[in-house]
Amino acid sequence: MKIVVSEILKSPIAAFHNEGLEVFSALEQAFKSHQLMEISFEGINRCSTQFLNASIGKMYLLFDPKQIDNLLKINFASLPHLAEKIEEVKENAINSKEYDSLIENAIA
């Protein structure tokens, strides 16, 4: 299944949390059907971390990262630094429970 962000958002800008949730819904549906997924950023000229957290980050937070890595292909299009942003969002989601524990211990 190919998920084209600009077609879902009807915009060249992927900036807001609620927009990320729209893309997350499409990713989640494909993932639960065990379909290969491609998320394409063709036609997007600006993408925020807030959007990425709500779409891709939420996938890594809720589902097995290895399964996602096996099923998800990302077309970065011509967005500079998008690969690095997505990697950071992914790592933050995967390690979120560890981060929460560190914070709890620090303020206890």
Image (tube, helix red, strand yellow):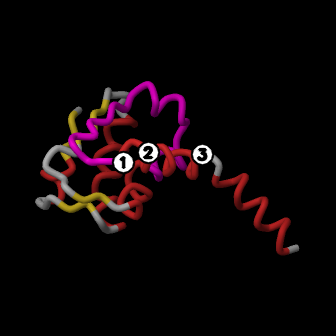
The residue beneath circle 3 is 94
Instruction: Determine the secondary structure under disc 1.
Output: loop
Q: Does the segment drawn in magenta span residue 34?
A: no
Q: Amino acid at mark 1?
A: His
Left or right? Give the position of 31 relative to 4: right
Q: Does the segment drawn in magenta span residue 62?
A: yes
Q: Residue at x 57, y 46 (%)?
A: 91
Label 1: how many Cα within 10 Å (few below 14, some 14–19, many 20+): few
Nearest to the observer: residue 106 or residue 66:
106
Instruction: Determine the secondary structure under disc 2.
Output: helix
Residue sticking out furthest to the right: 108
The residue beneath circle 1 is 81
Instruction: Classify 52 as above or below 28.
Output: below
Which contiguous range is marked in magenta? Answer: 57-80
Q: Residue at x 28, y 46 (%)?
A: 26
Q: Residue at x 25, y 60 (%)?
A: 14
The residue beneath circle 2 is 84
Residue 46 spot, x, y in % from top left:
24, 59
Per the model, the C-alpha gap separating discs 2 and 3 is 15 Å
The reply to whether the C-beta atoms of the residues labelled 1 and 3 are less than 8 Å apart is no
- The quarter of the image holding the C terminus is bottom right
Q: Amino acid at mark 3?
A: Ile
Which label is found at residue 28? none
The reply to whether the C-beta atoms of the residues labelled 2 and 1 are less than 8 Å apart is yes
Q: Amino acid at mark 2?
A: Glu
